[in-house]
Amino acid sequence: MHRERKSNNRSVPGGSKATEDLESRKSRNALKATKDLKSRNALKATEDLESRKGRSELKATEDLENRRSGSELPSPMIQLTPEALQQMIDDASAQAAGHGVDLALGNDEHGPVDHQADDQVEEEVESRPSLQEGELPPPPPPPREAPPEEHRPQKKYQTATRQASIERTKNAQAFPLAMAPPRRSPFATHILAEAIQPGIKIPNLSEYNRVGDPQDHLDRFLARADLLDISDAAYCKLFRTTLSGKTTTWFNQLPPGTVEIFEQLSQRFLHHFAINKRYPKTASYLFTIVQHEHEGLKEYVQRFSEAVLEVPHVNPKLLTSIMQQNLRSSRFKELITGKPPATKEELLARAAKYIRIEETAGTSTMTPMKRRSTEGGVMPPK
């Protein structure tokens, strides 16, 4: 009896050590199982996060496509700006990320963590053969290589979204990129209703594009249009064809239906482009048209006549006096001084006659005759 107790007491330390080793292995295995469980939960939470984020992006993309296409949208339609849409996606991503963290930490708001799964994992770990002292654990499996980019399967929501977009594009009703505005003419109704005889046009008349005197353009138009037997409405429509460039823009901007007669159109035309009008000069301008030293009488008379056209309603006596003052000393100057012409036409006619005499004699200028008392009478000009 005493020997049995002694042997039992001798065997207790050995059994105690085995029990401690078993407990230690269980503790290590439980800790490892817990880490593996947390790792799997974190991986699952990350996958759930990616899935929710993908679904959120899919839904946002489909909503954006529906708003762009304008089809399959309920009425009334909620309009979202790109900034609001991006904010919606960010909120959904943040919410999914928070939920994944809760899953990893065991604080899921949808319910407590399933501890039965943890117990099952611990039982599996305990059932595995324990490592002997000095025995190395098996090497971990080699990492799984990711497939090349070209062989990776596309996400289903990307393919579905793209396919839906293609189908909507094929089935969408084609609209023109731009629609012409309704025609609004400044002409009144009775002018638009009157048709012009075919083939009638204004010949040899250049278009007006803000260059030159508008009165000159109007006068040249009337000089040609008066040869045609046309109505006042035809005058309006034909004058419209002589405008180009900025003048066409001006005409199109006139209020609709405000031009009833050609007189209104011509007056508006002259008033709008009055800045380009050449205004007549005064008689004082003619005093600047002086005969130069080597200028012949013919050239001077031509230049003086052109200047007279720019000064309307000049007194003939004043015109003769101005020419007499501006001429160099010559026989013609003496002639108009002794017998002044009564009209401008007479002045120019006498100048033309004297020029022909000069050209016949072969001289361009003649000096005044010097009268000397000689036996025969008057000395000829040198």
Image: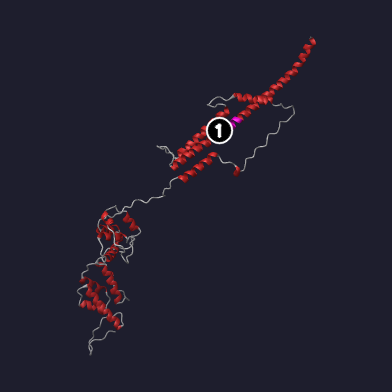
Magenta-drawn stretch contains 35? no
Q: Is residue 286 visible?
A: no
Q: Nearer the viewer, residue 188 or 245?
A: 188
Residue 225 vs 324, above or below: the answer is above
Q: Residue furthest bottom?
A: 375
Q: Using a 10 Å C-alpha cutoff, classify the residue at mark 1 as few (fewer than 14 neighbours), some (14 to 19) or many (20 or more).
A: some
- Tag 1 secondary structure: helix
Q: Residue furthest front?
A: 171
Q: Nearer the viewer, residue 32 or 382?
A: 32
Residue 123: x and y in percent read 66, 24
Q: Which residues are magenta?
A: 40-44
- At label 1, the amino acid type is Asp
Residue 307: x and y in percent read 28, 69
Q: Is residue 37 visible?
A: yes
- Image quadrant for the N terminus? top right
Residue 14 vs 81, above or below: the answer is above
* Residue displayed at 75% across by 19% down: 14
Q: Which residue is mark 1?
A: 48
Report the side of 178 relative to 362 (left or right). right
Q: Nearer the viewer, residue 218 or 319?
A: 218
Q: Nearer the viewer, residue 73 or 85?
A: 73
Residue 81: x and y in percent read 44, 40
The answer to which quarter of the image holds residue 298 is bottom left
Residue 337: x and y in percent read 22, 76
